[in-house]
Amino acid sequence: MKDSLQESNSTYVVIMAGGAGTRFWPASTEEHPKQFLDILGLGKTLLQMTYERFLPLVPKERIFIVTNRKYEELVAHQLPDLPVDNILGEPSRNNTAPCIAYATYKILDLDANANIVVASSDHLILKESEFLERVSSGLAFTARQDAICSLGIQPSRPDTGYGYIHYGKEEAPGIFKVIEFKEKPDQETAREYLDAGTYIWNSGIFIFSGRSMVKALRQYAPLICDLLAEVPYNSSEEYEILDERYPLTPNISIDYAVMESAENIYTLPADIGWSDLGTWASLHAELCKDEHGNAVQAEKSIIQDAKGNIIRVQAGKTVVVRGMTNMIVVDEPEALLIFPMDQEQEIKGVVKSFGK
């Protein structure tokens, strides 16, 4: 597959790996967020899986990891083959627009013809061949015209946890003009989107030429452009100047800063077995389960009169559960979480209340 999918020398991959992953507390912590965990029990962290997913597309020299400055050593440890200069440390967390701008400017300083894929480090993609084929189609499209593409996911259910993309005319095989981005809907609206057949989930995976992104930033996010465009990238002064300017950038997502305003936005609907693994419930949906819907990550367990739970305990421990339904149980050295799955969106707020 590597020979057939390998893109041109101007294709680059940017993996965003700076999030704190607080919804996965207590497994995910500020010191060791979920992208650095083997959350699926497969022997690889989410970051390692994402990095390896792109190797058939580009060599390691053209993969860049953008992370918080405090995680640079952790990235280097988990990806020992990645050139250390390809680990880009953000001095502050300012959301995805500054993150993508930083990586784009740095790569353009190396290659004025750069064509870039941006992806999160903590997504699950089961159909990796189909994923790479769709990405390759997007790269061919953005290489020949001024366009920014978002990979869209064919919805399998009326989910209220994702933003949606409403698309219209097909501009190239499998590539459609975006009409509008929609915020997370209520259940009735999500069902209407599904029935319409022209709405897809917004995956947060983007494809664009460096020139197109810089043009969009200049028009729709001029403050980010003013602060980051003139940093002396790929020099000994890069971090010093970045430390001064990056924290001054607005805390804003690329969706709000660019995608919802620009005219040249397209989407590639895809069926790739995708999940953003944003919560314990989304992880529960992807894990192997017993006949009663219990997903158990434990060396030894006795589960009786229980259904629909996710249970994760430390290595070497035996877990015994009886009479429990739709609960999250996560046992870590410094904390134990027992929480109703249908209230999991509140975990982040609970954790924040005691400073974790």
Image: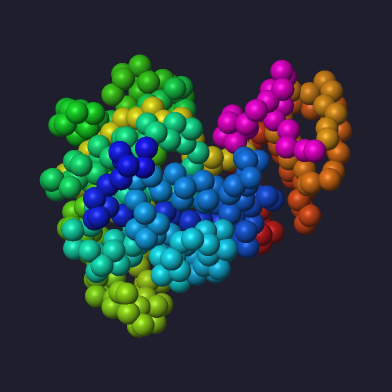
Q: In the rendered view, would you say 88 is above or below 5? A: below
- Where residue 263 appears, x then y in whole percent? 16, 44
44 drawn magenta: no
Name the residue: 44% across, 49% down.
120
- Where residue 322 appears, x then y in whole percent? 85, 27
Name the residue: 28% across, 78% down.
232
Q: In the rendered view, would you say 337 is above or below 290? A: below
Number of marks: 0
The residue nearer to you, when weighing 274 against 256, is 274
Q: Quadrant of the N terminus?
A: top left
Q: How is the image coloured?
A: rainbow
Q: In the rendered view, would you say 200 is above or below 135? A: above
Residue 53: name its quadrant.
top left
Is residue 296 found left or right of 271 in the rendered image?
Answer: right
Is residue 296 found left or right of 266 in the rendered image?
Answer: right
Let me know if residue 337 appears in the view: yes
The residue nearer to you, when weighing 85 against 55, is 55
The residue nearer to you, when weighing 197 against 188, is 197
Name the residue: 24% across, 69% down.
109
Q: Quadrant of the C terminus?
A: bottom right
Let me know if residue 255 appears in the view: no
In this view, which residue lies farthest toward the front?
3
Residue 4: name its quadrant.
top left
- Where residue 17 appears, x then y in whole percent? 48, 56
295 drawn magenta: yes
Residue 186: name its quadrant.
top left
Name the residue: 32% across, 79% down.
235
Read off the magenta span. 282-299
- Where residue 144 appears, x then y in whole percent? 13, 45
